[in-house]
Amino acid sequence: MSVMYNNQNVDEQYASTLEPNLYYNPVLVPGVTCSDEFTFGPAGQIFVHKLNTSAAEPGKPGRDFTDEATADTLIPIQLNNNFQKSKKIYGVQAASVSFNLAEEQLAVATQECGEGWMQSGLGCLVQEGTAATLTTAITDVKDDIVKTRAEIIKAKGRVDVVMCSPDFYAQVLLAAGKDFTPEHNDRIAETGNVGRWLGMLFVEANGLTGSIKYYDSTGTLKTVNCSTVQYVMYYHQTLKVVTNFETARIVDSENFVGSKAQVEMNTGYKVANAALARVRKVAAG
């Protein structure tokens, strides 16, 4: 429909730059918030050895050794989460716009697969982590964090990441700025980013809401309800994110004059040691 100023038809134009789409924050970073250390060689499933262990007990001096037979357990990581996006670009469409439609659609497909890849990793973290003891509403943020941390430490673990829901991260922003540490407070006020606090990296995962799907190491599709999750505290190396195939391409179509922008990723997710991850929820309702 034409646009008129009084009785005069005026020209219309379409911008050659695109308004960016919105995606969840990319929070899975190998070596920082997850581990990809078992990404090696061609395989659809990886088994990780974990040797059995027990602390030595004291005895009287002057005695023989008691031999223990070696034993282990296997941790399976099945690379069974496949993400695909394929965008059809008809030649007549590409010829009728002032921007490179194929390249822009490839960028969109890459973002869409990346978002799904990240969301499934968060779902695995929530599903396979251990439920924290506390379930009441969080009123004292610092106290709550320290108590959950103690659960991991008592289980002989360590912790370096707190993956936060948006609502809990807002509470952390307020709580972390209360302590009288001027440089730290100024940085939080200026950037809105907590960063490291109490010896842990606080990450705002705005995708940690609603339901998330992923295939676990048994090949079972899990639908994980994250609506009551406040945060997941964990050691980053326990969240295994292993990708064995990743590609992005623009190919000519054999069915029509035009091309397809295609992205594919194939990944396995596993919390290798549930004792190193605590999922803090609040009671529903």
Image (cartoon, rainbow, N blue to C red):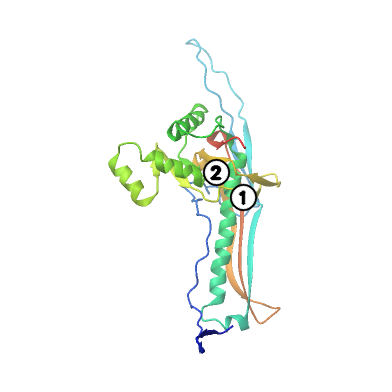
Rendered location of residue 101, percent (x, y)? 56, 76
Residue position for label 1: 268
Where's the C terminus, which quadrant? top right
Foreground of the two, 69 or 79? 79
At x 53%, y 15%, the residue is: 64
At x 51%, y 49%, the residue is: 205
**Is 227 located above or below residue 63 in the figure?**
below
Between disc 1 and disc 2, whose residue precedes?
A: 2
The secondary element bearing badge 1 is classed as: strand
Outermost left residue: 182
The secondary element bearing badge 2 is classed as: strand
Whether the residues at callouts 1 and 2 have beta carbons within 8 Å, the answer is no
Outermost bottom residue: 8
**Is 220 located above or below residue 89 in the figure?**
above
State which quadrant residue 111 falls in. Answer: bottom right
State which quadrant residue 53 falls in. Answer: top right
Rendered location of residue 258, percent (x, y)? 63, 80
- 13 displayed left or right of 47: left
Amino acid, disc 2: Leu
Foreground of the two, 80 or 4? 4
Residue position for label 2: 239
Foreground of the two, 215 or 188? 188
